[in-house]
Image (cartoon, helix red, strand yellow):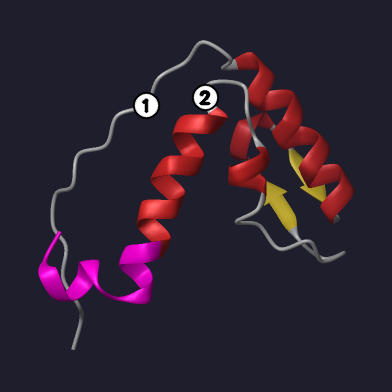
């Protein structure tokens, strides 16, 4: 990741997301769920095989899915990082 991008808010978010995804695939969804809006109109569409609307429904789906990956792993390969001007 480029130095400018790594120091940006986006870079910090990506780092938090990577950590949260690692936790998620180990059956610990709390950090991943903390990155989501808790609003009544939050939706999950198609991800993890369903459509959910409203924070409680989305949170329940994420909990359920995380348990399926309790012994999982994830990888990431960055193809390109940069800021669009």
Q: Secondary structure at mark 1?
A: loop
| Quadrant, the C terminus | bottom left
The magenta span reads 1-12
Choose between 15 and 41: the one closer to the eye. Answer: 15
Note whether 41 is above or below 83 in the view shown.
Answer: above
Instruction: Give the percent coordinates (x, y) of residue 22.
Output: 45, 32
Residue to which mark 2 is pinned: 25
Which residue shows up at 67% across the image and 40% down it? Answer: 30
**Quadrant into which the N terminus falls:** bottom left
Determine contact: label 1, label 2, CB under 8 Å. yes
Secondary structure beneath label 2: loop
Q: Residue furthest top?
A: 71
Q: Is residue 37 above or below residue 70?
A: below
- Can you identify the residue that label 1 sits on? 74
> At 56% across and 31% down in the image, what residue appears?
24
Query: Is 68 inside the magenta-drawn segment?
Result: no
Residue 80 falls left or right of residue 60: left
Q: Please give left or right for residue 49 compared with residue 53 in the image.
A: left
């Amino acid at each position: 990741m480029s130095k400018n991008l790594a120091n940006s808010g986006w870079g910090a978010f990506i780092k938090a997301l990577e950590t949260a995804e690692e936790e998620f695939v180990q059956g610990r969804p709390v950090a991943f769920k903390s990155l989501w809006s808790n609003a009544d109109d939050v939706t999950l569409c198609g991800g993890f095989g369903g459509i959910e609307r409203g924070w409680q429904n989305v949170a329940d789906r994420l909990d359920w899915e995380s348990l399926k990956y309790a012994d999982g792993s994830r990888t990431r390969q960055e193809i390109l990082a940069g800021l669009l001007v």
